[in-house]
Image: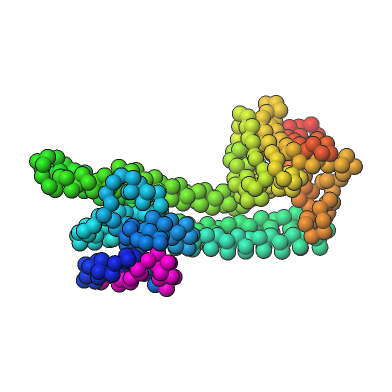
C-alpha cells in the first residue's frame, strides 16, 4: 500500500505551512516536527513515507538528523530530501554523505518539489515490493528447508532401528522423499522468483525509458541559447542530483538484484539435480556437474568453516546412477566438514586411472582418524560421533553404492593431519559387466 505520509522538519513553522500548502492538494498527508529530537519521535508515531528536512536547525541540524535516521536499520529506507539555502559543493557533498537521497533549494519550487517527491516515493514503492517478494521467497525457502530437514531427521531415526538388510530400502525411500520435496520446493520457489525477475525487467525497461527521455531533454537543452535562464537551471539541477552517477548506480542495483534471483534459481536447479528422479536408471552423466550440484546443496554445512578447492582433471562422462553418486559425494563432504573444527580446506580432485577408469579424491585437513578406526568406518552403524549425531550408515551406504558401480574406495588418514578418500570408478558400466562375464 502506498505511503503518502510526509514528515516536514523545520524550526520555522511558516516554512512547514508553505510546503504543506503545496502538498495537501496532491493528497499528501503532512506532519510537522520543529527539531531533530521531535522528528525522531514523530517517525515512530507516524511512520512517514518520506521526510523533508531543513538543514539549518539549532541543537541537531539536518545532517545529524539524516545520519541518525539512516544509521537505524529500521528507519534507513525512508527517503530524505534536504531543504537548504546552501548551494555550495561541500554542503551538498556532506548531505549525500549523511545519507540523503535529494537536495532542494530554498525558496522551494512546487513543481520541482512534487517531481522529486513522486520519483522518490515511486522508487521506494518498487524497492518495498521487491523486499516483500524477497522476504516471501526467503520464508518459503526456510519453510521448505525445515520440512526437508524434518523429513531427513525422521529417516535417520528410522535408520537407527533397521538392520543391515534394510539399508537399501531405507536409502531408496530417503531419496524418493528428497526428490518429492525438491520438486515441491522448485515449484513454490520458481513462482516468486519469476515475479521478482519480471518486476526487475519491467523496472529496468522503465528506467531505460526515463534515460531516453532525459537524453531528449539534454538534446533540447543544447538548442537553447547559452544565456537562457532555463539552461542555467538545468545545469544546476544536473550538478545537484549527479545524473551520471544516478544513472550508473541504478543500473548496477538492478543487475545485483537480477544476479541474486539467478542465484536462487541455480540453487533450486542443483537441488533437483541432486535428488535425480531417474535414480534407478543407468545413464551417462557429467561427473563434475554432479559434484558441483552436491557442493551447492550442502554449502550451508561448509561455508562457515571450509574452503573447497577443485582440482578437476580432463575426464569423460561416466555411465552411472547419478543421484546415488551424489549421495556418496554428500556423505564424504559432510564428514570432511565435521572433521574440521574451525577453519580448513577440502580439496576435490578428479583424473584418469587408465583408459577405462577414473578417480575422485576428497581430501581434508581436519582431525584425521585413529588408525584403529580406519578399517571399521564402512561397517554398518559404526560411528565415532556422539549419540544422536549420526547413525553410522552414511559411509556404509556410500561403500555399497561404489560397489554397485563396480568401483573401489581407499582411505588414507593420519590423526591430527587429515583424511583423503580415493574412489575409482569404471567409465562404462556395461563394458565392465561384459569384461567380467568374459572371464567366467
Dividing the picture into quarters, in which one does residue 24 lie?
Answer: bottom left
Please count the marks in the image: 0
Q: Nearer the viewer, residue 22 or 440?
A: 22
Dividing the picture into quarters, in which one does residue 85 lie?
Answer: bottom left
**Residue 436 % position (x, y):** 76, 34
Location of the N terminus by quadrant is: bottom left
Dividing the picture into quarters, in which one does residue 167 lie?
Answer: bottom right
Asked if the stretch drawn in magenta spans residue 121, the answer is: no
Location of the C terminus by quadrant is: top right
Q: Does residue 374 appear to the left or right of 237 in the view shown?
A: right
Q: Does residue 257 appear to the left or right of 267 in the view shown?
A: left
Q: Nearer the viewer, residue 223 or 409?
A: 223
Extreme residue toward the front, this view: 58
| Residue 5 visible within the image | no
Above or below 247: residue 11: below
Asked if the stretch drawn in magenta spans residue 42, the answer is: yes
**Residue 260 % position (x, y):** 47, 50
Above or below 196: residue 284: above
Q: Which residues are magenta?
A: 27-45
For image coordinates 14% across by 40% down, the residue present is 222
**Residue 405 % position (x, y):** 72, 41
Amino acid at each position: 500500500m502506498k505511503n503518502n505520509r510526509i514528515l516536514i522538519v523545520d524550526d520555522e513553522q511558516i516554512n512547514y505551512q508553505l510546503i504543506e500548502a503545496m502538498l495537501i492538494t496532491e493528497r499528501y498527508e503532512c506532519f510537522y516536527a520543529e527539531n531533530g529530537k521531535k522528528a525522531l519521535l514523530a517517525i515512530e508515531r507516524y511512520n512517514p513515507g518520506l521526510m523533508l528536512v531543513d538543514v539549518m536547525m539549532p541543537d541537531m541540524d539536518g545532517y545529524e538528523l539524516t545520519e541518525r535516521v539512516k544509521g537505524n536499520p529500521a528507519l534507513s529506507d525512508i527517503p530524505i530530501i534536504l531543504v537548504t539555502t546552501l548551494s555550495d559543493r561541500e554542503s551538498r557533498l556532506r548531505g549525500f554523505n549523511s545519507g540523503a537521497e535529494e537536495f532542494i533549494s530554498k525558496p522551494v519550487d512546487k513543481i520541482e518539489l512534487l517531481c522529486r517527491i513522486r520519483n522518490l516515493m515511486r522508487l521506494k514503492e518498487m524497492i518495498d515490493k521487491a523486499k516483500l517478494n524477497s522476504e516471501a521467497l526467503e520464508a518459503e525457502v526456510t519453510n521448505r528447508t525445515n520440512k526437508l530437514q524434518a523429513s531427513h531427521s525422521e529417516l535417520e531415526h528410522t535408520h537407527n532401528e533397521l538392520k543391515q538388510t534394510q539399508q537399501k530400502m531405507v536409502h531408496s525411500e530417503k531419496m524418493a522423499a528428497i526428490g518429492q520435496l525438491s520438486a515441491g520446493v522448485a515449484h513454490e520457489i520458481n513462482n516468486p522468483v519469476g515475479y521478482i525477475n519480471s518486476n526487475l525487467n519491467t523496472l529496468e525497461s522503465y528506467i531505460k525509458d526515463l534515460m531516453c527521455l532525459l537524453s531528449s531533454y539534454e538534446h533540447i537543452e543544447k538548442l537553447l541559447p547559452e544565456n537562457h535562464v532555463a539552461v542555467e537551471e538545468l545545469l544546476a539541477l544536473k550538478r545537484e542530483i549527479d545524473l551520471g552517477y544516478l544513472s550508473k548506480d541504478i543500473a548496477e542495483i538492478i543487475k545485483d538484484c537480477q544476479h541474486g534471483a539467478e542465484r536462487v534459481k541455480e540453487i533450486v536447479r542443483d537441488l533437483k539435480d541432486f535428488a535425480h528422479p531417474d535414480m534407478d536408471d543407468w545413464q551417462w552423466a557429467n561427473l563434475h556437474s554432479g559434484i558441483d550440484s552436491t557442493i551447492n546443496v550442502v554449502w550451508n554445512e561448509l561455508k562457515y568453516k571450509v574452503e573447497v578447492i577443485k582440482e578437476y582433471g580432463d575426464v569423460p562422462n561416466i555411465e552411472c546412477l547419478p543421484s546415488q553418486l551424489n549421495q556418496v559425494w554428500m556423505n564424504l563432504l559432510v564428514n570432511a566438514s565435521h572433521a574440521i573444527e574451525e577453519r580448513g580446506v577440502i580439496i576435490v580432485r578428479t583424473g584418469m586411472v587408465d583408459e577405462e577408469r577414473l578417480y575422485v579424491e576428497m581430501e581434508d585437513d581436519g582431525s584425521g582418524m585413529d588408525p584403529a578406526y580406519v578399517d571399521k568406518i564402512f561397517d554398518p552403524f559404526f560411528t565415532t560421533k556422539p549419540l544422536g549425531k549420526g547413525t553410522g550408515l552414511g559411509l556404509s551406504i556410500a561403500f555399497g553404492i561404489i560397489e554397485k558401480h563396480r568401483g573401489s574406495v581407499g582411505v588414507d588418514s593420519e590423526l591430527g593431519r587429515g583424511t583423503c578418500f580415493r574412489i575409482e570408478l569404471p567409465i562404462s558400466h556395461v563394458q565392465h559387466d561384459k569384461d567380467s562375464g568374459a572371464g567366467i
